Image (cartoon, rainbow, N blue to C red):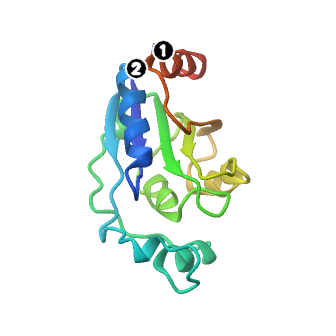
Amino acid sequence: MSKTLVAYFSASQTTAHVAKELAQAAGADLYEIKPAVPYTKSDLNWMDKKSRSSMEMNDKSSRPALADQDANIAAYDTILLGFPIWWYVAPTIINSFLESYDFSGKKIVLFATSGGSGFGKTVDGLKPSVAADTMIVEGKVLNGRQTAASLKAWAETVL
C-alpha cells in the first residue's frame, strides 16, 4: 500500500470524527485543514444569505485563507480528502487547500459528511484547483456511525 494521508476540513467536528476513525482504520497519517479565521455558528447559518459560509459558497472564486500550509504533501502518494458537503459541493476552503500544494501525479479520493445530499458536482468544482495529472476520485459520503472494519474495507478498495 502506498503512503496515505487523510486530510480534512471540519467546521462542526462531524467530519473530524470520521476522518480520525478513517486514518486509524487505513493506517494513514492525519492532517486538519484549518481556516485562518475559524467558523462560528453564525458563520455556518446557511439560511442567512449574508452569513460567511453562504457568501463564500455564492462566490466560486472565494478562497478562504488557511491557518497554515505545513502539510507535507510531497511525502504521500494518495490523499483521502474529507469535508462536509455545503450546497451540494465541497466548501471553497478545499479549493484553497488544493491550490496551496503541488498534487501532481497524486491520487485524491474524496470522502464527505452531509446532512442529506451527495457529492453533486464536487469533482468538477475541484479539478481546476489541481494539476492536470492529479487524479480526483469521488469516494463516499460517510454519514452516521462507521465501524473500523467498514472504514478499513472502504479504504482498501480506493487505495
Dividing the picture into quadrants, the one containing residue 20 is: top left
Q: Position of residue 32 (x, y in %)?
A: 33, 47
- Give the residue pinned by disc 2: 25
For the residues bearing labels 2 and 1, Cβ distance under 8 angstroms: yes
Asked if one can make out residue 141 in the rendered structure from this viewpoint, the answer is yes
Nearer the camera: disc 2 or disc 1: 1
Determine the secondary structure under disc 2: helix
Please tell me which of labels 2 and 1 falls first in the chain: 2
Q: CA distance from mark 2 to mark 1?
A: 7 Å
Circle count: 2
Asked if one can make out residue 8 in the rendered structure from this viewpoint, the answer is no
- The disc placed on residue 126 is none
Q: Is residue 97 above or below residue 55?
A: above
Q: Is residue 32 left or right of residue 149?
A: left
Query: Residue at the spot x=42%, y=20% of the render?
Result: 26
From the viewer's side, name the closer residue of 46 and 126. Answer: 46
Which amino acid lies under the numbered mark 2 shown in the image of this protein? Answer: Ala
Query: Residue at the spot x=53%, y=64% of the render?
Result: 92
- Give the residue pinned by disc 1: 149
